[in-house]
């Protein structure tokens, strides 16, 4: 073996040792909380492209005893995401609930609220993540009501033509606002994932 070749091997070994990196453990992603979701729809609910949706008033009902974990910006992100998802499916958003084909509304309830089960019974859904109780849990209930019941407050349960429920643990209050907004959008899209597109 020539001295030049030995020198080359030594140089190569030094280069390889310099390229070795110690693996680092990344901090856990704060948005990756487990969640479950379920949905159901009336067999007669076959919406057509171009049909209109209006928000129930108020669009989001809060059912929580403590401070609201989701602030106004996040509520706006949720309602905007719902409207985008409806538009993506070929529907029209209208402000006139009396003329809308369908009414859509949402309830956000936290597990510290004594009457949270009232909403779950109304929607007749329960997306249970079997939380160990170490973190507060929120349920997002959303329902679509036949527009003929626009003036009935609250509408009867049989008026629901599509409904969905998503349950997840709430992020820590000190979580960065941008992360909270991004997660709210992602979970809202997941909540609406089974809503059919207009035919």
Image: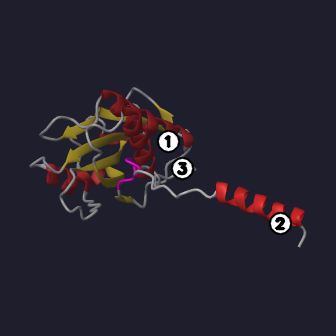
Across and down, in percent, residue 127 comes to 29, 60
130 on left or right of 190 = left
Q: Label 3 belongs to which residue?
A: 197
**Badge 3 or badge 1: first in the primary sequence:** 1
Q: How many numbered tags mark residues here?
A: 3
Q: Nearer the viewer, mark 2 or mark 1?
A: 2
Q: Which residue is mark 2?
A: 6
Write down the quadrant of residue 77 in the picture. Answer: top left
Between the residue at mark 3 and the residue at mark 1, the CA separation in whole angstroms equals 10 Å
Decide which of tag 2 and tag 1 comes sooner along the chain.
Answer: 2
Give 61 or 156, whichever is nearer the viewer.
61
* Residue 108, horizontal then vertical, whole percent: 26, 43
Seen at 66% across and 59% down, the residue is 17
Give SS at disc 3: loop
Q: Earlier in the sequence, mark 3 or mark 2?
A: 2
- Left or right: residue 92 versus residue 107 is right
Give the residue at the far front of this rendering: 3
Please name the residue that numbered disc 1 is placed on.
85
Give the crowd class for mark 2: few <14, some 14-19, many >=20 residues within 10 Å.
Answer: few
Q: Range of the magenta residues?
A: 28-33
Q: Mainly helix, strand or loop, the magenta region?
A: loop
């Amino acid at each position: 073996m020539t001295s030049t070749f030995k020198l080359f091997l030594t140089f190569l070994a030094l280069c390889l040792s310099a390229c070795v990196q110690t693996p680092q453990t990344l901090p856990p992603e704060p948005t990756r909380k487990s969640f479950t979701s379920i949905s159901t729809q009336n067999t007669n609910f076959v919406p057509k492209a171009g049909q209109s949706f209006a928000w129930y008033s108020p669009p989001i009902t809060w059912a929580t005893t403590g401070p609201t974990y989701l602030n106004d910006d996040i509520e706006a992100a949720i309602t905007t995401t719902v409207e985008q998802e409806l538009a993506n499916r070929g529907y029209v958003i209208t402000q006139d609930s009396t003329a809308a084909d369908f009414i859509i509304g949402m309830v956000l309830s936290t597990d510290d609220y004594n009457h949270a089960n009232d909403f779950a019974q109304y929607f007749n859904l329960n997306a249970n993540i079997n939380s160990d109780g170490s973190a507060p849990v929120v349920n997002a209930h959303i329902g679509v009501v036949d527009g003929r019941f626009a003036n009935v407050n609250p509408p009867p349960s049989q008026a629901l033509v599509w409904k969905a429920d998503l349950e997840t643990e709430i992020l820590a209050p000190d979580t960065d606002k941008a992360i909270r907004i991004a997660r709210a959008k992602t979970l809202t899209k997941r909540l609406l994932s089974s809503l059919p597109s207009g035919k």
